[in-house]
Image (cartoon, rainbow, N blue to C red):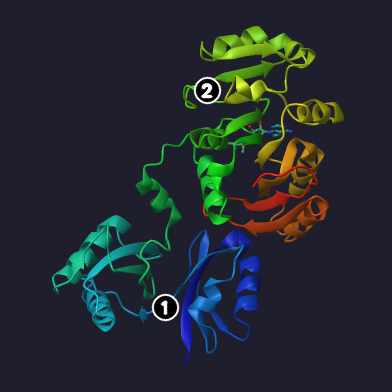
Amino acid sequence: MEEEFVATADLRFMRLALRELHDAFCDARIKKFESDDSKALFLISHEAKTFSQIERRTFSYVDNILPVSAVLKDVDPEYFVLAENITNMLDFLGKKTFRLEVKKFGFKTNDRAKDLEVKIGRAVESRGYTASLSKPEVQVYITLTSRGAIVSVSGEPDKYVLDAFRHFNRSNIRHLNRSEFKLIEAVEHFNVDISKIKSCIDVGAAPGGWTHYLLENGVKVLAIDNALLDYGALGSKRTLVVVKDSESDAVKERVRENIKIVRESDFWSDNGVRGIFDDYELVHIKMNYSSESDTKRLNQIERFDMFTIDINMNPEDAAKIVVSLQDSLKNGAVLIMTAKMPDKKREDYAGDIRKVLSGSFTDIEYKKLPHDREEFTVFARYKDRGPGMV
Ligand SMILES: C[S@@+](CC[C@H](N)C(=O)[O-])C[C@H]1O[C@@H](n2cnc3c(N)ncnc32)[C@H](O)[C@@H]1O
């Protein structure tokens, strides 16, 4: 029997996403159903694949993929046909409670997705079913396009998210900037157990979104960036800022009173850098990482459980920075790195990064996360010989 799937992909990653879809569904018919300024939506028909087979695959460039329960060609202004379709499905499944998630994709209306969920939800409720935000038996996903509605149904309500941006907006996560969501998404997608991470080196840390997420999760952070962090938004963590000798007074004027500022000559000459995290949760070294001497110095500080790097640099060079600082990592340490794509036409950034990392990192994976823009995210684990972390 033929099954149908719906997949979305960012236009900037379209060729890579299509290649992944073709690999996953060999022989499938893949049709572009709709596209807007930033995304394309594909309908895929396949005779052999079931959703559980597809679901087990990891897609790096396809945003999300769901089985299709119905494609409705017309959406009437009262959402009558849509509501009827949903109630038929609930009847078929023998379920009474539901939750809707609507995503607009080229659908012409001034209503926001949230308003549409209320309108369509009411139409379904008027037929004797109950909308439940907290404990629905069934989650119904509705993508409204200019060519009709695509409906998907899941008996595991919290498993999928059609619109990651709304999901985050609803979640009330206290965040310092939008960039922080990239790290939250990466930790979730790559199944990083953040409770096991005690310390992290964060290169390209300013203004501090990633550092904020790490500190909020009890991780001690060595932040490297020549720019200042938004120390006020980072909360009341014990903080040390290491500045160039020439700029110490100027920096003092710009940061909170209870932050300790130390000149770099004092910091490094003191031989006391090991153990610095006994006294501070956040150590920010104000510098642009580059040279051999930076590496030697930084490697003295601590062996970290995690390495995060989010800098505007060719991804191959960013990966080289990671490798040059690898002696700062514990065995099994987690790497999360954004790979910026300076040239959209080139596709094999992932291959370049793998070449640089594979000598000392394992389990290398990639994912274009919802909050990634001209970039994707790389995960890897450090494989050293020394005593390891769990
Ligand atoms: C995209 S921002 C990082 C955003 C940050 N992850 C956050 O969540 O707020 C990139 C940062 O990389 C820093 N940067 C670029 N090259 C660097 C280098 N060689 N060493 C350290 N930081 C660098 C820039 O100063 C800039 O603050």
Ligand 1 rendered quadrant: top right
Q: Is residue 236 above or below residue 385?
A: above
Task: Tally the marks.
Answer: 2
Give how far across and how far down residue 234 sits, in percent: 50, 27
Q: Secondary structure at mark 2?
A: loop
Apparent side of residue 103 relative to residue 117 in the rendered image (left or right):
right
Which amino acid, mark 1? Val
Residue farthest along the top direction in this orientation: 249
| Cα–Cα gap, marks 2 and 1 | 47 Å
User: Are the residues at dot 2 and dot 1 in contact (C-beta closer than 8 Å)?
Assistant: no
Residue 311 seen anywhere in this rendered image of the structure: no
Report the disc number at residue 68.
1
Give how far across and how far down residue 85 sits, in percent: 27, 79
Q: Residues within 10 Å of mark 2 (few under 14, many from 20)?
A: some
Question: What residue appears at the point 63 percent right and 18 percent down from the top-left corner?
Answer: 241
From the image, tell me which residue sits under label 2. Answer: 231
Q: Secondary structure at mark 1?
A: loop
Question: What residue appears at the point 77 percent right and 56 percent down from the top-left corner?
Answer: 354
Question: What residue appears at the point 64 percent right and 29 percent down from the top-left corner?
Answer: 223
Give how far across and how far down residue 187 sits, in percent: 55, 49
Q: Give whichever of 333, 27 is nearer the camera.
A: 333
Question: What residue appears at the point 68 percent right and 40 percent down from the top-left corner?
Answer: 312
Q: Give whichever of 13, 187 is nearer the camera.
A: 187
Residue 205 figure quarter: top right
Q: Is residue 178 above or below residue 357?
A: above
Which amino acid, mark 2? Tyr
Q: Is mark 2 within 8 Å of ligand 1?
A: no
Apparent side of residue 280 relative to residue 111 in the rendered image (left or right):
right
Q: Is mark 1 within 8 Å of ligand 1?
A: no
Q: Residues within 10 Å of mark 1 (few under 14, many from 20)?
A: many
